[in-house]
Image: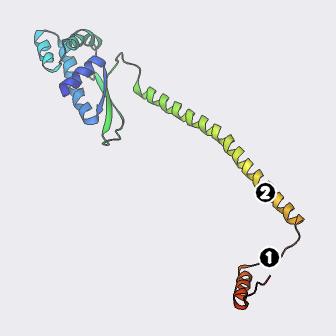
Amino acid sequence: MYRNMVTSLLEHERIETTDAKAKEVRRVAEKMITLGKRGGLHARRQALRVIRDRRVAAKVFDDLAERYSERQGGYTRVLKLRVRPGDAAALSLVELVDGTASGPVKDEKAAAKKKKASRKAAKAAEEKPAAKKKASKKAAAKADSKKTAKKAAAKKPAAKKTTKKSAAKKTTAKKKTGKSGD
């Protein structure tokens, strides 16, 4: 598994994996780049024990060895990304330093956060006027219903209000006398 991951890292110059695997892959990948810088047949054969693709081995011995010729180690970096939802494993990004892969990850993450925040703000701004309109419509509807209720009450003559107790007395009186009371 580590051999495959190291081969993928050297080929693509960036892979995402769990934090523990990332630290181990970093260790092996740095040894491979050091072998590439050393050059020679013996170093190439040692590297081919780990690297599973001859094209990737050629890249290590030609391109990467040349790229890191002035550097004395520290060819890779591990950036912690997030926690995987399924099993809560800490995920990390392993990448080659000064790689030709697309820009720094931290800038991408910051840009994504800003974009997400601006979308939320725009959505909230759209919802606020709509909520205000709904609230004002509800208030207007309540006021209209109160006005119409007052007008209707003013037009009707005052009627006797019957309570539950008085209605109960009437029904019991009907039962006792057998006559209808109204």
At label 2, which amino acid type do we have? Answer: Ser
Real-space Cα separation, disc 1 to disc 2, in angstroms:
22 Å
Q: Which mark lies nearer to you, 1 or 2?
A: 1
Which residue in the structure is indicated by mark 2?
145
Secondary structure beneath disc 1? Answer: loop
Q: Residues within 10 Å of mark 1 (few under 14, many from 20)?
A: few
Q: Nearer the viewer, residue 89 or 33?
A: 89
Q: Residue furthest bottom?
A: 176
At label 1, which amino acid type do we have? Answer: Lys
Query: Picture quarter containing residue 146?
Result: bottom right
Q: Position of residue 121 (x, y in %)?
A: 59, 37
Quadrant that contains the C terminus: bottom right
Query: Picture quarter containing residue 3?
Result: top left
Which residue in the structure is indicated by mark 1?
161
Q: Residue at x 32, y 32 (%)?
A: 92
Q: Residue at x 56, y 33 (%)?
A: 119
Q: Is residue 121 left or right of residue 76?
A: right
- Give above or below for 116 relative to 35: below
- Give above or below for 120 relative to 106: below
